[in-house]
Image: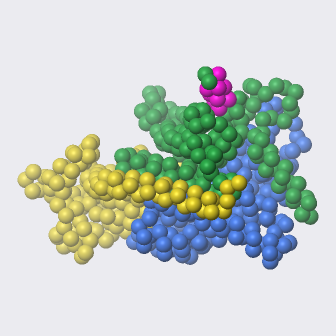
């Protein structure tokens, strides 16, 4: 049991990190990575949704009819996201306003559905919940690193606290969208270079995306 | 006021394609954007399918939101309702194409299942609600966002095809270089905001 | 195996349960959400009149003490009054179109109508990281103390946001329009 937990922890945080290894779930959060507070809130929201939906889906795994599996899973995920949305609106209205529609987009974050399909379906509730939690944590850590760079260089602050003691010029580009692409690109590069053995020339492109890609390419050829 | 009447649909169309592109400025639809962009032909096919689905679902969601969700006071359930509408629409489009336009189905049909989970589609519907758009604004927003997404993925795929044979530093191949290229494209697109100064 | 009826019953049940939970949560939090909107509005009015209370309770007390609402031609003008009834500034709703949708906020001018006291946004839908940066205090604070004698206010008075020319221009246009409409009303007197 302990081994399972440890395995889930390391797998999700490093060897199969959802962002830098599997390139999943980038859509919903990248837009708010210019401030660390926003990123943290989105990350916590995601961790809440992913762990509880993994728990629920795993608990119901023997009851959910196969043919409506996806829609039931989406329903469960969406419900938790709505709870987060209502909670933020009630207790942290300013954050809710700053994050706007991005809270709702947690639903389409591929990681949640990915964990549900790949793990929660086949495992017991408790370990599924932890797997989801760790996947969310690995994701949040990566995004916090991105937003740390963006906020530090873009505003000269960390969590809104000014640390620009030397009054250096801040880099406007860091606040703008392109910076997020550059930073995440470099992070994936570093993560791939650090870990994958040299002989595998193809970097760890995630299985799902490779599958999607191969399927799509193949069928386009067949279609013509 | 409140209706957002003032912004003209044409302005929304151009803004959605160029200055505030869904992928390049809002990071929506990233997953398939990165993973299905290694061949131009495939990428362009996905772009067309996304455009089609985006226009249809945004308009449907607008109708559902105005005529069902708002009168019943179900705003807090909108996420679920939108997702259901999107999933159902994709299914129906798939069946209609298969039945009546088999040629098009062969070209676009395979992309449709990938699209249900594309965050850009849900994103557009959520933006449309938050921005309180009217019917024509929504229609042009859907068209513009779809075209913008198509343009962006085609550009990325074309560049990736060009550099496919070049030798890159270890670890930079694939996703990493795609993100960096995307960043450069995004930077270039910001330049459009100097041309389309909205008055 | 599990039949068709089971599938329908299961889907129906789970939808019913989830919807009920959400409806209860929504009901429970609704009063709080409404109060938040109220506080956000009062905070915005106070902010543009250069009062920045910290807590929600302070917002309520300060607003009740020093702000009087007057209706002029169907539009509300919020007047800041000092202890002795001396007028210190006027605040008014401003709105207009941004790049994506309407931008709404408040704007305050000084009692002598020569200086802009401040602006604040309560709703907009500009792109995060680009036009959305109008919410940053570095941008908003630039409007404090801008003289109104040589209008319109232009990008010579306040710096726009890099990469968001459309939004920056829209804000200037909204601010100038609002001031143009407000000042004649104040000339007449409340």
Along the viewing direction, whichever of B77 and A171 lies nearer the viewer:
B77
In the rendered structure, the answer to whether residue B33 lies left or right of residue C164 reads right
In the rendered structure, the answer to whether residue A50 lies left or right of residue B186 reads left
Give residue A21's position: percent from left, percent from top: 71, 35
Q: Among all residues in the image, which is located at the extreme top? A: A2
Q: Please provide the residue range marked out in magenta.
A: A3-13
Please identify the quadrant where the C terminus of chain C is shown: bottom left
Q: Is residue A98 something that shows in the picture?
A: no
Chain the render paints green: A
- Which residue sits at x=88%, y=40%? B166
Q: Is residue A220 something that shows in the picture?
A: yes
Q: Tell me if residue A8 is in the magenta stretch.
A: yes
Chain the render paints blue: B
Q: Tell me if residue B20 is in the magenta stretch.
A: no
- Which residue sits at x=26%, y=46%? C56
Give residue C151's position: percent from left, percent from top: 36, 64
In the rendered structure, the answer to whether residue A48 lies left or right of residue B114 reads left
Chain the render paints yellow: C
Along the viewing direction, whichever of B106 and C112 lies nearer the viewer:
B106
Along the viewing direction, whichever of A216 and C100 lies nearer the viewer:
A216
């Amino acid at each position: 049991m302990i081994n399972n937990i440890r395995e889930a922890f390391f797998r999700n945080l490093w060897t199969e990190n959802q962002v830098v290894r599997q390139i999943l779930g980038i859509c919903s959060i990248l837009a708010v990575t210019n401030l660390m507070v926003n990123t943290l809130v989105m990350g916590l929201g995601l961790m809440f949704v992913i762990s509880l939906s993994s728990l629920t889906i795993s608990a119901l795994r023997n009851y959910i009819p196969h043919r409506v599996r996806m829609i039931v899973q989406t329903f469960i995920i969406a419900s938790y996201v709505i709870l987060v949305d209502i909670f933020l609106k009630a207790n942290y209205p300013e954050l809710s306003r700053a994050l706007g529609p991005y809270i709702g987009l947690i639903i389409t974050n591929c990681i949640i559905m990915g964990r549900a399909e790949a793990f929660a379906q086949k495992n017991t509730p408790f370990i599924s919940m932890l797997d989801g939690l760790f996947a969310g944590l690995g994701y949040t850590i990566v995004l916090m690193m991105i937003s740390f760079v963006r906020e530090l260089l873009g505003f000269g602050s960390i969590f809104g606290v000014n640390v620009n003691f030397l009054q250096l010029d801040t880099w406007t580009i860091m606040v703008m969208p392109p910076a997020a692409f550059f930073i995440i690109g470099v992070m994936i590069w570093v993560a791939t270079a650090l870990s994958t053995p040299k002989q595998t020339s193809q970097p760890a492109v995630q299985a799902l995306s490779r599958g999607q890609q191969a399927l799509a390419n193949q069928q386009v050829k067949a279609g013509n | 006021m409140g209706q957002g009447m003032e912004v003209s649909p044409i302005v929304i169309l151009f803004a959605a394609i160029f200055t505030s592109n869904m992928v390049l400025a809002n990071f929506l639809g990233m997953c398939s954007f990165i993973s299905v962009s290694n061949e131009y032909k495939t990428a362009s096919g996905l772009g067309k399918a996304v455009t089609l689905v985006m226009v249809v679902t945004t308009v449907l969601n607008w109708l559902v939101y105005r005529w069902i969700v708002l009168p019943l006071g179900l705003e807090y359930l909108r996420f679920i309702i939108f997702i259901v509408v999107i999933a159902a629409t994709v299914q129906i489009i798939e069946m209609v194409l298969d039945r009546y336009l088999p040629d098009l189905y062969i070209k676009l049909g395979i992309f449709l299942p990938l699209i249900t989970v594309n965050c850009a589609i849900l994103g557009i519907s959520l933006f449309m609600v938050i921005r309180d758009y009217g019917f024509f604004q929504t229609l042009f927003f859907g068209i513009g966002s779809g075209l913008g997404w198509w343009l962006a993925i085609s550009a990325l795929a074309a560049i990736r095809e060009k550099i496919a044979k070049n030798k890159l530093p270890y670890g930079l191949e694939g996703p990493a270089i795609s993100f960096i290229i995307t960043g450069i494209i995004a930077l270039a697109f910001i330049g459009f905001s100097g041309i389309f100064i909205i008055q | 195996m599990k039949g068709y009826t089971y599938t329908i019953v299961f889907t129906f049940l789970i939808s019913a349960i989830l919807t009920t939970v959400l409806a209860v949560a929504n009901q429970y939090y609704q009063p709080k959400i409404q109060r938040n909107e109220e506080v956000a509005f009062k905070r915005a009015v106070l902010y543009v009149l250069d009062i920045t209370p910290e807590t929600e309770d302070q917002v309520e007390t300060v607003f009740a003490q020093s702000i009087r609402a007057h209706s002029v031609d169907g539009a509300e003008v919020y007047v800041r009054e000092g202890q002795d009834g001396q007028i210190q500034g006027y605040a008014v709703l401003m709105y207009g179109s941004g790049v994506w949708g309407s931008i709404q906020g408040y704007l305050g001018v000084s009692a002598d109508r020569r200086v802009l006291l401040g602006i604040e946004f309560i709703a907009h839908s500009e792109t995060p990281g680009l036009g959305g940066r109008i919410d940053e205090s570095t941008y908003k604070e630039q409007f404090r103390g801008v003289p109104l004698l040589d209008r319109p206010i232009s990008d010579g008075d306040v710096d726009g946001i890099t990469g968001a020319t459309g939004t920056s221009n829209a804000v200037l246009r909204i601010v100038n329009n609002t001031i143009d409409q407000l000042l004649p009303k104040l000339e007449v007197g409340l």
